[in-house]
Image (cartoon, rainbow, N blue to C red):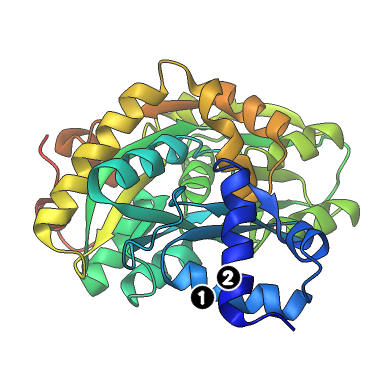
Amino acid sequence: MPPRSIVREKLLEALRMSAGELVPQSYLHKSLKISRSRVSEILDELEREGLISRVKVGNQYLVKLLDFRGEPTGRLRVFHVGLVWSSEYPFLTIFAKKVKEKLNAIIKTVVFTSSIQATRALVLGDLELALTPAITQIHFYSAFKNFRIIGGGAYGGSKVLVKDSVSAHTTYSSELSTMDLVRSLSVREGIIPAETSTRYFRNPEEILKAISAGAVKYAVVWHPIYRRLEGAGYREVLKGEDLEVMYCCTLAASTIVSEETRRALSNIYRESLEEYRKAPERWVDWYSLQVGIPRDVVLDGVREYKINPVLSKTDLRRYASKIPVEIPNADTVLSEVLEAEE
């Protein structure tokens, strides 16, 4: 068996030849005729050193060399960004690129099935950053106060749908999220009957199973989930922005990250959003691989979501006033949690 250092150099050389493109991990062990376990062990080492990044797509890992010269530069800082499985965030592609260029740091995405899971990971210190619904962040901040909102994001991409042939009087939505806010406002406006009971799903598969069982009359969901429902005979009742819900997910940073670094990340993020909305289609490939959503589905989502890079305390106060569950003194909470300037 070749010495460890030789295996390492062979892997680095194979990745250099790819010129920074994503390479299937299975290809490396097959082409170099080195055992799968040995390759995995060395790649773990290279990832810890910040020389490569890996993303899981389906049942395989894709590997990319971050330092094309293959010269160890010391361990790069990694910012773990939690997000909810969605087609909403292709702008992370350009954000990751700019963070690497300006801060010599890596953005590594961590995908969750719900906004509560992702925001909880942020407050527990498992993440440095999270793109989760502003409503979830405001509620969590009321209890934990160990993060700050540092950037806007996207909105839209949410719908209320109904299937007229379903007899069940049930609405399915996700808990403590933008979808739940849209659901609550729809009930308040009489769009969803007040007597309709609410069920919360923890991941997209749960609502799809409930639909197969004929248990879902109304659904309040995001892209690309609502495309599946439309294919199953559900019709659109309204979009989230029809109810003036103009914030969905915003970028929050843990106070583990220094104030100076949070400020730098905020500026880079805002630049990224401004550049992204000029030509969003350019930035879908990397993001598609990160979340395991096909490229054409992410492209469809680009047309559904709108970009709102500005954090306005006035707009967030208006947004907070729509939240059905009261939070302790909205003005106080917003003055503390909102770090970026209006």
Residue 313 pos. (x, y %): 16, 39
Q: Quadrant of the N terminus?
A: bottom right
Viewer-side residue, 75 vs 281: 75
The residue wearing badge 1 is: 45
| Residue at 86% in and 44% down | 166
The residue wearing badge 2 is: 8
- Determine if residue 309 is in view: no
| Residue at 45% in and 72% down | 48
| Residue at 15% in and 58% down | 333
- Picture quadrant of residue 30: bottom right
Viewer-side residue, 65 vs 60: 65
Which one is in front in this view, the residue at disc 1 or the one at disc 2? 2
- Picture quadrant of residue 300: top right
Q: Which amino acid does label 1 sit on?
A: Glu
Residue 339 pos. (x, y %): 13, 49
- The number of numbered discs placed on residues in the rendered structure image is 2
| Residue at 24% in and 51% down | 149
**Left or right of 134: which side holds 222?**
right
- Determine if residue 92 is in view: yes
Does 8 appear above or below 211? below
**Left or right of 248: which side holds 337?**
left
